[in-house]
Amino acid sequence: MWGMESLSYTEAARRVKTAGYDGMEISAGPDKRNEAVQVMYDNGLELILMAFGGGSNFIEHKKKYHDDLLDIASYKPLFINAHTGHDYFTFEQNIELIQVATDVQKQTGVRILHETHRGRFSYSAPAIQYYLLKVPELRLTADYSHWVNVAESYLSDQMENVNRAIAVSDHIHCRVGHPEGPQVNDTRAPEWKDALESHAKWWDAIRARLQKANTPTLTVTCEFGPAGYLPTLPYTQQPIASQWDINVFMKDYLKKRWQV
């Protein structure tokens, strides 16, 4: 629903279905989950749900994270994409939260993936290495655009770190970042050709790994954000490109690249 907040779930689902998507990844609060799930199923769309902790107080955050995961899992989405922890929590605290997710996954049978995201335990390619060593069963949603922004580079000098993440990434957010931001202004523009190719090679590697393992499905969320992530003109706040068109382009780009 990011960028479609003015639409109802039904209107958004129909627009998404018409554009040729297979499903939606939705962040729905407790009061909206029943409606979101029902509308997706009514429109023949697959559903990924998102989970977040809450607050800077670790004890309160952990309880909300646990309760949120448990409630979301009851809806039986394809899986849960979790924004886990904070970069300012200690390593031990973030490990506790990862363990909470592992316990909920075992209890409910619903997979939980942890998104690579600024501000979370997974905020950078080097930082996540400690967690991958400590929790070998950790599985990720790959949004490496954040890492590009944090490192101020396309990570060519730390491919070992990236490759360890690729080995455990099961879902892709196909946003393209650049050294000074988590999202280029328009992937269709020729000046971002190299940025797009840098990210696409990482996505290719995730897909190749899953194909080798005979995994039947790879999910990809086209996640270019609206104004805020998308640059705007000063004063008028008019976006300089169409978020919707960029996301559709990304869907079609990957389908063509992968011949699916």
Image: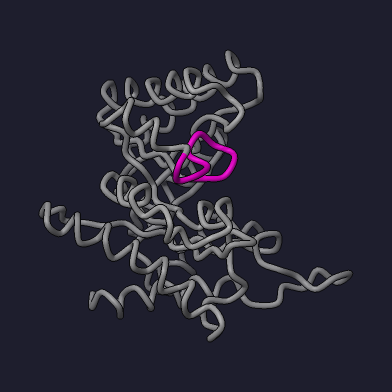
Q: Residue at x 28, y 21 (%)?
A: 107
At 50% across and 34% down in the image, what residue appears? 121
Question: Would you say residue 6 sits in the magenta stretch?
Answer: no
Residue 8 appears anywhere in the view: no
Residue 58 is situated, as x and y percent measured from the top left of the image, at: 59, 17
Q: Where is residue 56 in the image (x, y as percent from the top left)?
A: 66, 24
Q: Which of 257 and 29 is in front in this view?
A: 257
- Determine the image quadrant of residue 82: top left
Q: Going by the picture, which residue comes out furthest to the front?
A: 157
Q: Which of 22 and 31 is in front in this view?
A: 22
Q: In this view, does 108 lie above or below 179?
A: above
Given residues 183 and 148, the one toward you in this image is 148
Q: Considering only vertical position in the picture, is 67 above or below 224?
A: above
Question: Is 218 drawn above or below residue 255 in the view shown?
Answer: above
Looking at the rendering, in which quadrant would you find the C terminus?
bottom left
Q: Which residue is drawn at 48% across and 62% down?
A: 154
Relative side of 109 to 176, left or right: left
Q: Position of residue 142 (x, y in %)?
A: 40, 51
Q: Give the range drawn in magenta.
A: 117-126
Q: In which quarter of the image is the N terminus?
A: bottom right
State the residue lying farthest toward the right: 235
Q: Which residue is drawn at 38% across and 26% down?
A: 101
> In the rendered image, which quarter is residue 90 located in?
top right
